[in-house]
Image (cartoon, coloured by chain):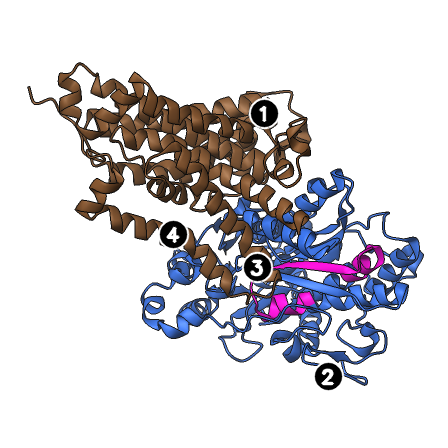
């Protein structure tokens, strides 16, 4: 993360220099032309040169090709990337042409990349974990094109891919911790639920962050530990399953706050239905602002804007100042003013940067809204880390078997977050230890039909 | 315990109604000899249109539009299978793909926006981008819904669920106790004999196929408006095929279809209840597989000649009829 930040800054410096250099060069060229031409006035000649440059730029806009794994209308993952694409296109000051291929199966990403390059794309952005290896292959095949892969770990910066490939991600665990604070602040039953997609590290760390936050607030309020229940639906997009799972959590375990990792607002809709029946059940936004799907039940939530990341890469490519990076966009990244502000001036709940908090519901008690804002501001400067003893009321963080995972002055590092395979002690259900058992038992069909993993919901990656 | 059962049963009925509505129509089609494998496609078209029409005009229009869409799609099947005597399996599967693709296209954000503005130019801006629609209101039946256990589970639902309660026995009665039902069954058993007795084989088959399309559209509308009011592409997620296996499981009997529908609905409900009761989380795979397992077993069984005779598969199911004059 640290190195990524530095290289980004270094890049911005380079970009600026390149821009200044360009202007100086244009001026010089104009001056030289004027001198050679021996004209009476230099100025009109300079203008001519500038015009030529502009026309050249117009003739060849920056072309960016995106590969999405889902339909852009899925309201979750691919929809989020498409919003990011539009955001970046709008703000990029030079001529830009961006296009996308949607619903591309992971095995077919190679063909998709070829298609996009055939359309003249200079920059290819692939947005599913399963696209990673092929993206690296094509980066090698087309060294004069630039590649960005989302949610993976291969990049030139990390040393396991060519230098024309970067990796990026919008990471939510800090926001899930803040959601947890809100949950612990409003829960009456002291039981919170989580509808989870797949037992992979990304989802596991989000569950842990949420439960740690909920425990922090609830224990501070009542002195008792929070109880948390997790339902696995083994799907990224399955509104019907998410709905049944949410209802089971409410009816069976009396959960009154539900967080989720599923790409539709189904869980929030269920919470809203209970609110209408005078039972207080709360939920959150996920990836997009989902308030309209549960105006009463919406507490806060995690929202991603991929735009700033994409815009950054547009700039790198168009100014020919590419540097391979591995970025995790967290709270504070890509915001203009990265200093913590006093609670009264906090920007928590407003759109900014790559990941930010959805508006805070007034149902969260005043003091806890202040606490959430305080932590949000602290995390802008990474002064607070949810996976630390401080995030657990001074107690070491233990897993379900009672083993201490984080103690003393430790904070979770990239390696721990990236490979988290344990649940915190407050979660009641064990973590399913299935690492694609079918694929292991019968590897052949998966080898020949890589799509099988996606269809059957066994391939646990985005 | 009572509360647990009440809420579990309530959800079971809610889910089961999707299967019940879809399989009731399919039973008529198959009894007349037409295998409608386009069920899934007709359901999702119903769901997509109920989404769009609810936003534009409200629930009633949405339900009518969904039924109409199902009937129209089944007419394509009818023309191909009855008039042109094409292979019903291939035609049906093609219609499923058509439905899945077309519904995703019609309901995709920009196309939907255009359709909504055409249907209702005065539509509030807020509704143009939203991917949900208001659900059908629930009307608890006065006295019946007070009964413990049963009341909450069966009599606290939206009108389409009550309609399915009425439709199943009515369709059983028509099929087995009326002249019309007799003609329909005879067409599915031996169309040549029925024809020689003056039954209009083609008309009966057309009607039965259209009924199955209408019910499939209605099932899709119910899925969206009564169960899961959020649109996403392919939201039927194989429910049409589960309904198809249910038809076989019920041995083409509308009354038995009720039991089968609630059995499958119950399996889906239990998946997530059992996970919280300490079943290992992998087990959803097992439970989620059950309806398909039942389908495979039943399909295997009916391919055996003497089993076919015993459970009464319509003898001419899937066989095109031509007069050969």
Q: Is residue B79 magenta?
A: no
- In terms of depth relative to the viewer, which is nearer, B132 or A90? B132
Element marked by disc 2:
strand
Please tell me if label 2 and label 3 are on a single chain.
no
Mark closer to the observer (4, 3): 3
Cα gap from disc 4 to disc 1, whole angstroms:
32 Å
Q: Which residue in the protein does label 2 denote?
A: A404
Please report contact status of discs 4 and 3: CB closer than 8 Å, yes or no: no
Query: Up-down: is B190 above or below B199?
Result: below
Mark closer to the observer (2, 3): 3
Tell me which residue sits at (57%, 39%) in the image: B227
State the mark number for residue B59.
1
Mark closer to the observer (4, 1): 4
Q: Does the magenta stretch include residue A201?
A: yes
On the image, the x and y values in percent for residue A91 come to 66, 49
Mark closer to the observer (4, 2): 4
Element marked by disc 3:
helix
Residue A326 visible? The answer is yes
Q: Please tell me the colour of chain A.
A: blue
Q: Which residue in the protein does label 4 denote?
A: B292
Q: Please tell me the colour of chain B.
A: brown
Please report contact status of discs 3 and 1: CB closer than 8 Å, yes or no: no
State the mark number for residue B274.
3
Residues shaded magenta? A180-207
Q: Which residue lies furthest to the top in this view?
A: B198
On the image, the x and y values in percent for residue A180 come to 77, 61
Dot placed on the residue nearer the N-terminal end, 4 or 1: 1
On the image, the x and y values in percent for residue B175 come to 34, 25
Please tell me if label 2 and label 1 are on a single chain.
no
Please tell me if label 4 and label 2 are on a single chain.
no
Dot placed on the residue nearer the N-terminal end, 3 or 1: 1
Taking the image as shown, residue A99 lies to the left or right of residue B291, namely: right
């Amino acid at each position: 993360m640290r190195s990524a930040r530095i290289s980004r800054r270094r890049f911005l410096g380079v970009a600026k220099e390149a821009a200044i250099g360009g202007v100086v060069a244009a001026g010089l060229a104009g001056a030289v032309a004027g001198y050679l031409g021996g004209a009476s006035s230099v100025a009109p000649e300079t203008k001519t040169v500038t015009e030529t440059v502009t026309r050249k730029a117009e003739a060849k806009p920056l072309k960016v090709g995106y590969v999405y794994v889902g339909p852009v209308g899925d309201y979750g993952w691919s929809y989020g990337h498409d919003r990011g694409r539009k955001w970046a296109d709008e703000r990029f000051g030079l001529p830009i042409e961006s296009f996308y291929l949607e619903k591309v199966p992971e095995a077919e990403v190679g063909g998709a990349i070829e298609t996009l390059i055939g359309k003249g794309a200079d920059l290819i952005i692939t947005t599913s974990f399963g696209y990673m290896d092929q993206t690296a292959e094509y980066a090698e095949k087309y060294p004069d094109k630039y590649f960005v892969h989302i949610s993976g770990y291969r990049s030139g910066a990390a040393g396991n891919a060519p230098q024309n490939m970067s990796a990026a991600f919008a990471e939510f665990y800090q926001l899930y911790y803040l959601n947890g604070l809100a949950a612990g602040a409003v829960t009456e039953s002291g039981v919170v639920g989580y509808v989870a997609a797949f037992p992979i590290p990304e989802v596991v760390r989000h569950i842990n962050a949420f439960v740690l936050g909920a425990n922090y607030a609830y224990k501070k309020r009542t002195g008792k530990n929070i109880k948390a229940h997790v339902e696995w639906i083994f799907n990224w997009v399955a509104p019907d399953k998410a709905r049944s799972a949410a209802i089971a959590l409410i009816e069976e375990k009396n959960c009154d706050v539900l967080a989720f990792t599923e790409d539709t607002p189904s869980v929030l809709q269920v919470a809203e239905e209970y609110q209408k029946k005078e039972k207080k059940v709360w939920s959150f936004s996920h990836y997009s602002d989902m308030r309209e799907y549960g105006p009463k039940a919406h507490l806060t939530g995690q929202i991603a804007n991929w735009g700033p990341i994409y815009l950054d890469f547009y700039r790198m490519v168009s100014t020919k100042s590419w540097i391979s990076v591995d970025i995790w966009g967290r709270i504070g990244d890509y915001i203009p003013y990265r200093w913590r502000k006093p609670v009264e001036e906090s920007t928590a709940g407003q759109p900014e940067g790559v990941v930010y908090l959805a508006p805070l519901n007034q149902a969260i008690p005043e003091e806890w809204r202040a606490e959430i804002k305080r932590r949000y501001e602290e995390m802008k400067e990474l002064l607070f880390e949810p996976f630390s003893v401080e995030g657990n009321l001074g107690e070491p963080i233990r897993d379900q078997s009672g083993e201490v995972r984080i103690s003393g002055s430790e904070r979770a590092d990239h390696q721990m977050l990236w490979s988290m395979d344990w649940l915190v002690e407050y979660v009641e259900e064990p973590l399913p230890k299935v690492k694609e058992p079918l694929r292991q038992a019968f590897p052949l069909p998966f080898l020949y039909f890589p799509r099988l993993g996606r269809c059957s919901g066994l391939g646990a990656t985005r | 315990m009572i509360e647990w059962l009440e809420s579990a049963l309530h959800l079971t009925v809610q889910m089961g109604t999707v299967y019940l509505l879809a399989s009731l129509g399919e039973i008529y089609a198959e009894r007349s000899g037409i295998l409608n494998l386009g069920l899934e496609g007709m359901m999702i078209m119903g769901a997509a249109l109920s989404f769009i029409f609810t936003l534009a005009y409200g629930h009633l229009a949405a339900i009518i539009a969904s039924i109409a869409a199902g009937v129209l799609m089944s007419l394509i099947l009818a023309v191909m299978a009855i008039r042109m005597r094409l292979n019903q399996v291939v035609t049906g599967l093609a219609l499923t793909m058509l439905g899945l693709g077309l519904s995703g296209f019609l309901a995709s954000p920009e196309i939907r926006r255009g359709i909504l503005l055409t249907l209702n130019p005065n539509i509030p801006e807020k509704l143009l981008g939203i991917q949900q629609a208001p659900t059908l209101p629930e009307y608890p039946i006065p006295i019946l819904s007070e009964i413990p256990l049963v009341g909450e589970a069966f009599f606290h639902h939206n009108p389409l669920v009550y309609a399915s309660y009425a439709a199943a026995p009515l369709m059983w009665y028509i099929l087995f106790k009326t002249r019309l039902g007799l003609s329909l069954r005879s067409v599915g058993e031996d169309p040549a004999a029925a024809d020689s007795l003056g039954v209009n084989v083609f008309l009966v088959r057309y009607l039965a196929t259209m009924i199955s399309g209408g019910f499939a559209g209605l099932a899709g509308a119910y899925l969206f408006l009564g169960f899961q009011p959020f649109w996403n592409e392919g939201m039927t997620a194989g429910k049409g095929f589960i309904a198809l296996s249910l038809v076989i499981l019920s041995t083409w009997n509308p009354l038995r279809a009720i039991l089968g529908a609630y059995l499958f609905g119950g399996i889906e409900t239990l998946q997530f209840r059992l996970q919280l009761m300490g079943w290992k989380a992998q087990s959803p795979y097992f439970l989620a597989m059950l309806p398909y397992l039942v389908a495979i077993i039943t399909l295997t069984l009916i391919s055996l000649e003497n089993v076919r005779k015993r459970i009464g598969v319509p003898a001419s199911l899937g066989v095109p009829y031509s007069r050969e004059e």
